[in-house]
Image (cartoon, rainbow, N blue to C red):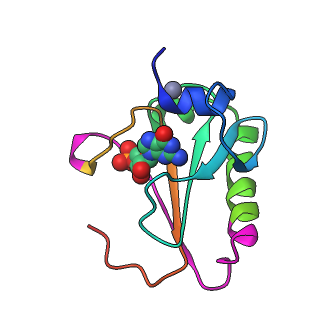
Amino acid sequence: MDCIFCKIASGEIKSSFVGENDWFVAFDDINPVAPTHVLVVPRKHVKSLEELAKYDTECMRSFFELVEQIVELKGIKTSGYRLIVNQGSDSGQEVEHLHFHILGGRKLGRLG
Ligand code: 5GP
Ligand code: ZN
C-alpha cells in the first residue's frame, strides 16, 4: 500500500521517532506550524477514529500515555498544547492514515 505513514511507521522510510509503543509511533511533522509539532500515528493503517475505537482499551490507554511522554519530552506540559485530528475533507485532512497532531511551544490561535 502506498501510504507514507505506513512506510514511516514500519521503518521503510527512515525517521527519528520522538516516542513509540506497541500501537503508535510519533515523529516531528515535516512542515511544522509551531515550535513543537509532533504526529502520533497508529502502526496499522487505521483510517478513522471510528476504526481506531474498535481496538481494545489498552490501545487507547497507550495513546494517552504516549502523548504524556511526548509533552514532557518537548517541555510543553506546563505551558500547554493542543491535540488535533483532521478527519474528512472539511477538516483539510491530507494524509488518509489517521494521525494526531500535538502542537505547542507558542500561543496558539483560535480553532477554525
Ligand atoms: P493533515 O492535514 O492530514 O491532518 O496533516 C498531515 C500532516 O502530515 C501535515 O502537517 C504534513 O506536514 C505532514 N506530513 C506529510 N508528509 C509527511 C512526511 O513524509 N513526513 C512527516 N514527518 N510529516 C509529513
Ligand atoms: Zn497507512
Give whichever of 23, 107 is nearer the camera: 107
User: Is residue 61 something one can see in this rendering?
Assistant: no
| Image mark count | 0
87 sits to left or right of 21:
left
- In the rendered image, the quadrant that contains the C terminus is bottom left
69 sits to left or right of 15:
right
Indicate yes or no whether the magenta region holds residue 77: yes
Give whichever of 53, 40 is nearer the camera: 40
- At 29% from the left and 40% from the top, the residue drawn is 88
Q: Give residue 18's position: percent from left, percent from top.
A: 71, 54
**In the current view of this chain or complex, which residue is farthest to the top?**
1
Q: State whether residue 98 is above or below residue 105.
A: above
Q: Give residue 102's position: percent from left, percent from top.
A: 54, 61
Give whichever of 15, 59 is nearer the camera: 15
Q: State whether residue 106 is above or below residue 12.
A: below
Q: State whether residue 94 is above or below residue 6.
A: below
Q: Give residue 40's position: percent from left, percent from top.
A: 59, 48
Q: Quadrant of residue 84?
A: bottom left
User: Is residue 11 something one can see in this rendering?
Assistant: yes
- At 46% from the left and 34% from the top, the residue drawn is 50
**In the current view of this chain or complex, which residue is farthest to the front?**
14
- At 70% from the left and 33% from the top, the residue drawn is 56
- At 68% from the left and 40% from the top, the residue drawn is 24
Q: State whether residue 76 is above or below residue 70.
A: below
Q: Give residue 1's position: percent from left, percent from top.
A: 48, 14
64 sits to left or right of 110:
right
Q: In this picture, which residue range is highlighted in magenta? A: 71-90
5 sits to left or right of 90:
right
